[in-house]
Image (tube, rainbow, N blue to C red):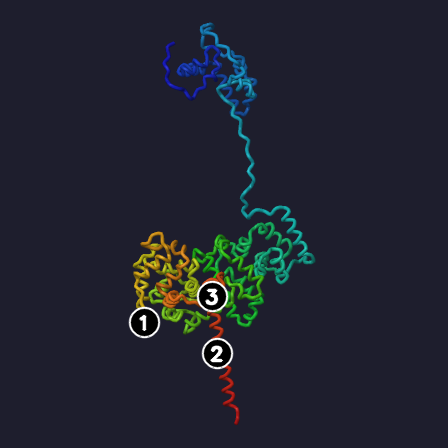
């Protein structure tokens, strides 16, 4: 038979034919012959019965028993498959060593002596993967759980009907490791039926079975404050803990006789929290923002520190006093709103009209005030924090948006010139030596060090420690002059306590000034009273 080579056949293994009359080398060198022989072999009656039997048994799952008991299989195992060649027409096969034969090794290692074109594929062993997601958080380990339950049992001894609110404070602080002023919020979270008491089972169900035990402190606080239908915190969520702080902290006892100032203090603290923590500026504080900020540390600090004014982050009463008094000074009609003409007086008329117009256009931040053309107390808190602490990221973003007139995310020389023109005019009116914008622009580029000298990005601004001074150059004349003259008093203040922020130093100076003014007014009033009494006295 004259057969031409047609190329390598990759779909057929010649050894699987098991034809003793033909060598495997001959089949591999002539793949067309192998394919023809295989087709003829499949057409034989015995082969058809064997294949059909194997397919039926595979469908019913009885393949192993079929292989052992099928007559066709036994016939195949006994090498009685009809030969395609007459006896004696092919030369004998050359003897091979069984030790190194791949086929022999394959047959020796096979679980069955039967070799068939249909291979039985064993199912892979399924690996058991431990649970890694828990809807309500990972449950606590047994040893942690048992130790916690032991502590709870000791606290609830003799309180079969549960603990009342005034008895629950030790649970909050010592067992749950939360700030003590979270006691009421946690109590209300557990006592959903308002029975006035929390039983041992209720507490275990919420804290242990609810997997609060294994959460980090930020997640615990977030879960306690958050409303169940929200995935974020709003300002009202902080009011219960601020009310308890005001009623229990020794540094705030003096405010208990003035409830209106208690409310203003709580509002100021909450506004400061959202100014620094809510980086998205949408009024919705997420768990991620809570974790990334320093609020949790400040809460723990205020819970341990009796002097509230030593807690500079968020809770200082002196800081609240300064913010409120500055607002009250500008709000001349005391309707609790500030307009453009009021704000232009801020800092002894230090701001330009153009920057005030940008603020009231609500470009840096949309007002929460419902009165057109006026900012309320919350809007003013955001403004004063941005103005007096230009080293913070919220402040840099606030003023960057003000200077970016077209909102394209970069500050160009023309935009900076627009604001500096008014500064230049004011310097001339005050008989100050004016500084040309070309010189100012070179100074700004040196201070910021932008990646592209043709414009300044927000990233450039945040990467420079002198960015606050750049904004002062553009729209705050008093601070610009103070920076140019390098006020030695301010430099000494910075060196004395580098950990204090610009806001901390400003609030400290202003509180001293305001308290001295108040003491002076008290003394004037007292002397006036004495003078009036002396006039009324009989001679």
Residue placed at 66% from the left, 58% from the top? 161
- Residues marked 3 and 1 touching at CB (< 8 Å): no
The location of residue 526, given as percent across then percent down, is: 51, 82
Q: Observer-nearest residue: 534 or 261?
A: 534
Vertical relation: 409 (above or below) 120: below
Q: Which residue is mark 3?
A: 493
At label 1, counting other C-alpha atoms closer than 10 Å, the crowd grade (few under 14, some 14-19, many 20 or more) is few
Q: CA distance from mark 3 to mark 1?
A: 29 Å
Q: Which mark is residue 447?
A: none
The location of residue 318, given as percent across then percent down, is: 50, 68
The location of residue 332, given as percent across then percent down, is: 41, 73
Q: Is residue 371 visible?
A: no
Q: Which residue is mark 2?
A: 521
Q: Which residue is mark 1?
A: 431
Q: CA distance from mark 2 to mark 1?
A: 35 Å
At label 2, counting other C-alpha atoms closer than 10 Å, the crowd grade (few under 14, some 14-19, many 20 or more) is few
Q: Earlier in the sequence, mark 3 or mark 1?
A: 1
User: Residue 369's image quarter?
Assistant: bottom left
Q: CA distance from mark 2 to mark 3?
A: 28 Å
> For the residue labelled by badge 3, is the local secondary structure a helix, a strand or a loop?
helix
Residue placed at 67% from the left, 52% from the top? 150
At label 3, counting other C-alpha atoms closer than 10 Å, the crowd grade (few under 14, some 14-19, many 20 or more) is few
Vertical relation: 289 (above or below) 426: above
């Amino acid at each position: 038979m004259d057969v031409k080579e047609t190329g390598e056949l990759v779909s057929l293994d010649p050894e699987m034919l098991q034809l003793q009359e033909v060598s495997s080398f001959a089949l591999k060198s002539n793949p067309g012959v192998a394919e023809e022989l295989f087709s003829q072999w499949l057409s034989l009656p015995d082969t058809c019965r064997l294949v059909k039997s194997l397919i039926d048994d595979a469908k019913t799952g009885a393949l192993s028993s079929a292989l052992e008991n099928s007559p066709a299989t036994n016939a195949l195992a006994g090498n009685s498959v009809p030969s395609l060649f007459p006896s004696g027409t092919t030369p004998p096969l050359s003897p091979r060593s069984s030790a190194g034969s791949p086929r022999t090794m394959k047959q020796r290692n096979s679980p069955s002596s039967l070799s068939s074109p249909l291979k039985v594929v064993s199912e892979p062993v399924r690996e058991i993967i431990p649970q890694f997601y828990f809807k309500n958080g990972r449950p606590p380990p047994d040893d942690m759980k048992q130790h916690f339950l032991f502590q709870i049992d000791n606290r609830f001894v003799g309180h079969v009907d549960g603990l009342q609110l005034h008895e629950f404070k030790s649970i909050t602080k010592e067992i749950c490791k939360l700030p003590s002023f979270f006691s009421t919020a946690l109590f209300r979270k557990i006592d959903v039926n308002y029975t006035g008491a929390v039983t041992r089972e209720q507490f275990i169900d919420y804290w242990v079975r609810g997997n609060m035990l294994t959460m980090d402190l930020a997640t615990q606080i977030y879960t306690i404050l958050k409303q169940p239908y929200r995935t974020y915190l709003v300002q009202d969520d902080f009011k219960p803990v601020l009310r308890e702080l005001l009623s229990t902290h020794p540094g705030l006892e003096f405010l208990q006789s003035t409830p209106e100032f208690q409310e203003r203090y709580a509002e100021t603290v909450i506004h400061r929290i959202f100014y620094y923590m809510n980086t998205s500026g949408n009024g919705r504080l997420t768990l991620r923002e809570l974790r990334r900020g320093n609020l949790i540390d400040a809460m723990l600090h205020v819970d341990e520190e009796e002097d509230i004014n030593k807690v500079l982050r968020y809770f200082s009463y002196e800081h609240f006093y300064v913010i409120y008094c500055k607002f009250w000074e500008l709000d001349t009609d005391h309707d609790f709103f500030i307009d453009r003409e009021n704000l232009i007086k801020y800092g002894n008329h230090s701001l330009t009209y153009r920057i005030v117009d940008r603020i009231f256009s609500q470009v840096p931040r949309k007002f929460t005030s419902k009165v057109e053309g006026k900012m309320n107390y919350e809007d003013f808190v955001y403004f004063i924090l941005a103005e007096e602490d230009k080293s913070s990221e919220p402040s840099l973003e606030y003023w960057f948006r003000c200077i970016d007139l077209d909102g394209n995310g970069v500050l160009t020389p023309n935009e900076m010139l627009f604001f500096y023109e008014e500064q230049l005019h004011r310097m001339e009116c005050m008989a100050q030596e004016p500084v040309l914008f070309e010189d100012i622009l070179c100074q700004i580029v040196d201070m910021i060090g932008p990646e592209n000298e043709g414009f300044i990005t927000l990233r450039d601004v945040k990467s420079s420690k002198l960015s606050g001074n750049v904004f002062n150059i553009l729209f705050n004349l008093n601070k610009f002059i103070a920076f140019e003259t390098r006020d030695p008093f301010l430099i000494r203040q910075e060196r004395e306590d580098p950990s204090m922020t610009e806001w901390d130093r400003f609030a400290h100076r202003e509180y001293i000034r305001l308290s001295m003014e108040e003491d002076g007014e008290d003394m004037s009033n007292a002397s006036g009273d004495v003078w009036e009494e002396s006039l009324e006295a009989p001679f």
